[in-house]
Image: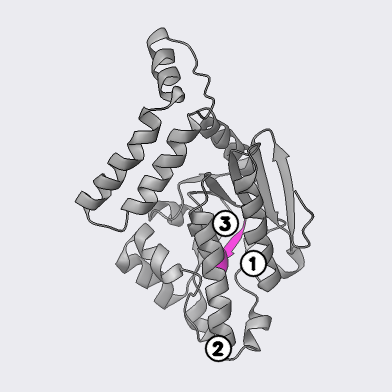
């Protein structure tokens, strides 16, 4: 893994941990951070020694939004290009062939909330704060927030959060479906790693294709979605891992999967 100026990376077994590292700016997203996030997740996707990724932030913030000072100087066309760049990074994370868990340790505002939403699963510290404050700055969420938020929490709640531009705490975020689990701050990363290990204990090909089936099917009608599911079932059903998993179940022993 190459060195990055705004990111830290650590590998624990088959878990790749990416940490946004601009604590002096509360880890705000600028063009460099977006480019480096795109690069590092490309590396993770291509690295067979990594089976799952965790994304978190350094210091008291996950990501406190996009860099407002940089955006203030942009004209309309430059702003559009910046939004498209951010959208591409979120899409890359969302469609990664490996699961990505957000460990939201602090502020997840604006682009930070959008970054968390692009991950497959969101775990949060009890001290985490979420919000889409863009309309208070004269803009709208532009890294996918107007699209992913209503898909996660419903149209009405998404409008409430976006139009009101207010922050909510971790427990409220969990109650509305924006966050899956909440932990004390000093337990967040360990609990996220524990769940990552649970996922790694399952058949990789099945997890990979389950993710693809969910992502492809969630925004289409049910008949089309179950068609995606049927096609995604073919490779796992023809795999060695399926024989191992079912054999282990019948023999009452732990399965040893090989991603084959």
Q: Residue 109 in magenta?
A: yes
**Residue 197 location (% of width, % of height):** 57, 32
Q: Nearer the viewer, residue 28 or 94?
A: 94
Task: Report the residue marked by disc 1.
Answer: 34
Residue beneath the point at 42% across and 73% down? 162
> Of helix, strand and loop, which one carries label 2?
helix
From the viewer's perspective, is residue 236 above or below residue 120? Answer: above
User: In whole angstroms, how far apart are the C-alphas of marks 3 and 2?
Assistant: 33 Å
First along the sequence among labels 3 and 2: 2
Mark 3: few/some/many CA within 10 Å (<14, 14-19, 20+) = many
Relative side of 218 to 30, left or right: left
The residue indicated by pointer 2 is 77
Contact between marks 3 and 2 (CB within 8 A): the answer is no
Q: Which residues are magenta?
A: 106-113
N-terminal label among 3 and 1: 1
User: Is 188 left, or right, of 223 in this rendering?
Assistant: right
Disc assigned to residue 128: 3
């Amino acid at each position: 893994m190459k060195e990055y100026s705004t990111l830290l990376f650590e590998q624990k077994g088959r878990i790749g941990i990416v940490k946004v590292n601009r604590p002096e700016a509360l880890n705000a997203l600028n063009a460099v951070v977006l480019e480096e996030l795109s690069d590092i997740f490309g590396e993770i996707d291509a690295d067979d020694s990594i089976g799952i990724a965790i994304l978190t932030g350094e210091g008291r913030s996950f990501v406190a939004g996009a860099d407002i000072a940089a955006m203030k100087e942009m004209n309309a066309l430059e702003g559009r290009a910046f939004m498209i760049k951010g959208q591409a990074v979120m899409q890359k994370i969302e469609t990664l062939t490996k699961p990505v868990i957000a460990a939201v340790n602090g502020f997840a505002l604006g682009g930070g909330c959008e970054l968390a939403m692009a991950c497959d699963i969101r775990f949060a510290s009890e001290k985490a704060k979420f919000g889409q404050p863009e309309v208070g700055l004269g803009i709208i969420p532009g890294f996918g927030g107007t699209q992913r938020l209503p898909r996660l929490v419903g149209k009405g709640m998404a409008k409430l959060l976006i139009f009101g531009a207010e922050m909510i705490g971790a427990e409220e975020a969990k109650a509305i479906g924006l966050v899956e689990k909440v932990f004390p701050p000093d337990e967040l990363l360990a609990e996220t790693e524990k769940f990552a290990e649970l996922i790694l204990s399952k058949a990789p090909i099945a997890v990979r294709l389950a993710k693809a089936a969910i992502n492809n099917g969630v925004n289409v009608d049910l008949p089309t979605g179950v068609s995606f599911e049927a096609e995604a079932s073919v490779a796992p059903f023809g795999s060695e891992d399926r024989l191992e998993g079912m054999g282990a179940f019948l023999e009452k022993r732990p399965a040893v999967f090989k991603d084959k």
